Amino acid sequence: MRKVNIKIDSVSYEGKTSQEFEGLTVNECEFEFSDENNKYKIILGDNSLTYKSEGKSKVNMEFNLERESACTYDTPYGSIPMKVKTTVLSILKKEIIKIVVHYVLDIDGAENFWSKEITIS
């Protein structure tokens, strides 16, 4: 495993946030990182991206242009069922991996647009 830096810029109806992490590569398509509350994993597929979180909250989201996916966001206060519809997914693998994903989260019939830009170096 080698060390990597991971930067995640997120845009939602609440505004823009940026987070930076130090992480590790499990292999060329899997990356692990953590904060004080959760452990995270990003898994790159040929035409998909999987984002997993375990700890204080738990989720396993798949981003795929070919199909909508369902997941559950488990929090200390209860579980929230969600549907994920990916509208844009771009994964550029070079010395620096650049990922852009736009998606709609459907939570109990209410749809919210999100955008994430992830840089792994």
Image: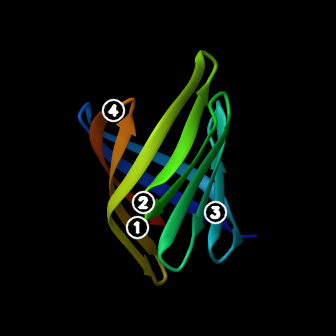
Q: Which residue is mark 3?
A: 31
In terms of secondary structure, where does tag 4 sit?
loop
How crowded pointer 2 is (Cα within 10 Å; few <14, some 14-19, many 20+) is rated as many
In terms of secondary structure, where does tag 3 sit?
strand
Disc 1 residue type?
Ile
Disc 4 residue type?
Gly
Is 98 in front, or is 2? 98
- The extreme top residue here reads 77
- Distance CA(mark 3)–CA(mark 4): 32 Å
| Residue 15 x/y as whole percent | 24, 35
Q: Earlier in the sequence, mark 2 or mark 1?
A: 1
Q: Which mark is residue 99?
A: 1
Q: Which residue is mark 4?
A: 109
| Residue 55 x/y as whole percent | 70, 33
Query: In this picture, is 28 found above or below 102?
Result: below
Q: Quadrant of the N terminus?
A: bottom right
Q: Nearer the viewer, mark 4 or mark 2?
A: 4
